[in-house]
Amino acid sequence: MHPNKILHPTDCSALSRPALTEALALAAEHGASLVLLHVVDSLGPENLSYGESISADQPEAHRRQLFEELHHLIPPGTRVHVDYVLSEEDLITAILRTQAEFGCDLVVMGTHGVTGLQRWFTRSTAEEVVRRAPCEVLVVKGPREPEPLRDFRPTGLHPGRLVEGSE
């Protein structure tokens, strides 16, 4: 695969850094451009405190601040063309719409590794994007401790695992 345009959805956290690093490396290696997407709760004036009057500059100042934060994710001296996108849509919709609108042929995203019982009650964004995106999706796991494996006690009828090899 030789991607031309890579989408990296980010929440700007340290947990998403490994995926950003991978997206930048792939873009540099293949001469691809990068689309950096950050989904926020609001791009409008809802962030004002009670009693503040709304001026036209306040939402724009909030948007400029969000774009500045997004720009600071890219290390200085990076030689990759980057488009920056802010969205207030549902996360999965924002990822799929941005991929389609920019014609991205690869999505590189992180996963926060929700496991166990919590996984049954929450929707995995990475899984949903893998299912629904029309392009390749690379999910990058961040560093974490491996989970312990369940104990297994083989029996004569159920040895658990058989390995056959040629020597």
Image: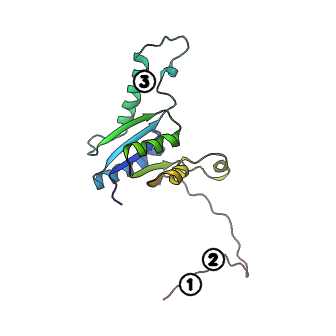
Q: Position of residue 95 (x, y in %)?
A: 47, 43
Where 86 sits versus 53, above or below? below
Question: 37 or 28: nearer the eye?
Answer: 37
For label 2, the SS is loop
Q: Disc count in the image?
A: 3
Question: 152 or 81: nearer the eye?
Answer: 81
Residue at the spot of label 3: 62
For label 3, the SS is helix
Residue at the spot of label 1: 164
For label 1, the SS is loop
CA separation in Å, label 3 and label 1: 62 Å
| Mark 3: few/some/many CA within 10 Å (<14, 14-19, 20+) | some
The residue depicted at 68 percent of the width and 66 percent of the height is 151
Where 53 sits versus 72, above or below? above
Residue at the spot of label 2: 161
The residue depicted at 54 percent of the width and 10 percent of the height is 51
Q: Position of residue 65 (x, y in %)?
A: 39, 26
